[in-house]
Amino acid sequence: MSVTYIVVLVVVIWLASAFYGDGLPKKYRLRKCMGKYWKSAFPNSSKDDIREFLILFTDAFAFSTKDKLNFSPSDKILDIYHELYPSKWMADSLEVETLATDIENKYSVNFNKLWHENLTLGELFSSVKNT
């Protein structure tokens, strides 16, 4: 292999990891832990309940579970989705549909009745915990 080929390959790999990282959009990857915001918004919910919900969310979006507390209660689900798929022409991996199925299976809640374009993670959490 030529040195030029190796340098180009290294640059491409570096750029890919810089832009895509572990799949978590940069906006959320750069955040500090949002746990205090979850506890403040839901003081009567246990940390385990919050984490369990966030793991369900991160699994549906194929994010690493270690990133679960990078999301805040005020984050809109569609904003997160649009960070992953900024172009309407990009094929998605059915993240919202997977989330809907997982929410319905775990919490026995009709996701479609809760859904609206500005639905936040906190609003969804509140809805599933109040059932």
Image: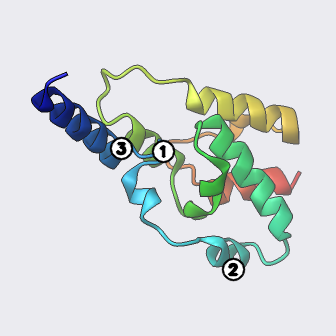
Labelled pair 2, 1 in contact (Cβ < 8 Å) = no
Q: Is residue 119 left or right of residue 1?
A: right
Q: Which residue is mark 3?
A: 17
| Tag 3 secondary structure | helix
Q: Amino acid at mark 2?
A: Ser
Which residue is at a point 31% across and 36% down the rendered structure image? 86
Q: Residue 42 appears in which quarter of the rendering?
A: bottom right
**Residue displayed at 69% across by 80% down:** 40
Q: Relative to 112, is 89 on the left or the right?
A: left
Q: Earlier in the sequence, mark 3 or mark 1?
A: 3
Q: Nearer the viewer, mark 2 or mark 1?
A: 1
The part of the image, by quadrant, that contains residue 37 is: bottom right
Q: Is residue 131 visible?
A: yes
Crowd class of label 2 (few under 14; some 14 to 19; many from 20; radius 10 Å): few
User: Does residue 110 appear in this view?
Assistant: no
Residue at the spot 64% in from the left edge and 55% down from the top edge = 66
Residue topped by disc 1: 22
Circle 2 sits on which residue?
Answer: 40
Would you identify the image quadrant in which residue 122 lies? bottom right
